[in-house]
Amino acid sequence: MAKEKTAKKQSSIGFKDRIGTKMIAVMMAITIIPVVTALIFSYQTSTTKAMADAEESLNWQAWFIESEFETVITKNIQAIQAVADSPSTSDFMSDQDNPEYIEKELQYLVDIDAHINDGNITVLTGADGMQVLRASGDCVDVGKREYFQEAMKGNTSISNIIVSTSTGVRQVTMAVPITNTEGTVIGVVQRNYDLNEFHKFLAEEADNAYIIAADGILAAHSEREIGADEEIDMSGEECITSGQDAGVYETKVDGVPTVVAYAKSSLTGWTICTAEATKSIMSAARSSALVVVVIGIIMMVIAAGISIFMARTFVEPIKDVSESLAALADGRFVRISKFGGRKDEFGEMVGNTNIVINKLDEIVTNIKSSAASVGSSSEELSDMANQISQTAEDVSNAVQEIASGATQQADEIQSASENVGRIGDAVNDVQDSTGSLSTITDKMKEASEVSSKSLASLQDSATEMTAKIDEISRTIQATQEAVSNINDKVAGITSIATQTNLLSLNASIEAARAGEAGKGFAVVAEEIGQLADNSK
């Protein structure tokens, strides 16, 4: 029953409990965990690096555009400052009706505009705020303009976004004061700069960049021109409210997560921003991560194949050993024909298992032979016991016959004694009665015949007793020979039991060497030892 339970247990191992399944799971885990960890780390590193690179790139773009923006502003301010400092401008402002001064100054303004060549014009404005000279367009009153009032205070001024009264163009105006020799401000040189020129500039430098005026109104955008009637307030943006000169932050533009880098112009107070959608930033990182994922999946597939191959390589020898042990538990000696040539531990295990099976086969064969010898000796012993029993019965019968003969002999002796007494009586009668001699003689003859018969009967009883005693002697001799033969057989059985016990000990030693695989052998060895003790 124990063997059947063992075999059933070995053959009913669930899929999840199999060594192969566990080995595959472990090897897959060893492969998948580092790969997944690498994928996660790679993705996080890629996205973090992509975000950092994007922020750095956007920040660099913002500063570059800010530098270019300030270059444009500085170039224009330097140009109008040169006009303000020119003697011809001072002469014209002192005598605005002089045709010579007008022609000379107008030509100077044209030359300045041609030199800058940005499509914008330089304008001279009187102290009352009325424009007095310009290369093109109508002169208008700008006296209420903030930039004019600031310039009249003797300061260089840069306006916020304004819409030109004469041209209807969105522009920024830069103004510097014109002073006479005494240092009195006698007018203003201004230059209007079309903000659409910034749109063109931004479109060339970045995909998504914009400029915000000091008052928070969007001045220009790289993606499109802003109409004169549009006023897009961005004063709530972090780049305006942070109070920082530069920075990077994340926001949503039209609901799309976007990274914005900004740099504030110290010259104008305007803020230059560059932006890029987070999705766009992450797309390259995700593409790179996707490549890594594909490679990781391929590695996992390869690892799975290797795991299955290695598991089969490990499990199949163990399976064959298990099947061989299961057969051994059923009393069959099945040797493992495969994997014996392997040079690893599994080959050694298979070889040792076959050695144990061979040794157990030899032990069991010897046990069977010994059992057969014990059986034969037992049969002989049984026959001898039957013979001894029969002999004892014969001895008992002979003794009974001897006792019966002795009783009969005693009766006959008693009868002879009585006859002798009668003879004595007869002699006395002869002595007493000579006259009765004939009668006495007859009686004596009769008594003599009876005595003769009694003596003959006594002789026959004595002869028969002698024969019985001889038969008893022979029976006792046969009994002694049977006992001697029994002693020899018992000595043989004792020797066989000792040898069987020695074989059991050897089997126990081999089972101990086999370890887990020899537990079944240990049971067999114990049973053999008990058989040896019983035989002994």
Image (cartoon, rainbow, N blue to C red):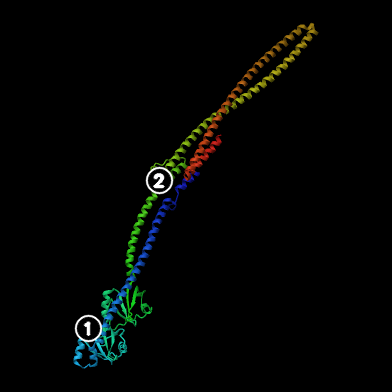
Quarter of the image for the C terminus: give it.
Answer: top right
Residue ID for mark 2? 344
Residue ID for mark 1? 113
Cα–Cα span, label 2 and label 1? 92 Å
Give the left or right position of residue 484, taking residue 280 as reference.
right
The numbered dot on residue 53 is none
Q: Secondary structure at mark 1?
A: helix
What amino acid type should be assigned to the residue bearing mark 2?
A: Asp
Place of residue 14 in the rendered image (x, y in percent of width and height, measured from the top left) = 44, 51
Q: Nearer the viewer, residue 454 or 400?
A: 400
**Vertical relation: 474 (above or below) 363:** above
Residue that lies at the very extreme toward the right in this rendered image: 432
2 or 1: mark nearer the eye: 1
What amino acid type should be assigned to the residue bearing mark 1?
A: Asp
Residue that lies at the very extreme toward the front in this rendered image: 181
Place of residue 262 in the rendered image (x, y in percent of width and height, measured from the top left) = 34, 76
For the question of whether residue 169 can be seen, the reply is: no
Q: Nearer the viewer, residue 265 or 412?
A: 265
In the image, what residue occupies the spot 27% across and 74% down? Answer: 205
For the question of whether residue 398 can be seen, the reply is: yes
Q: Secondary structure at mark 2?
A: loop
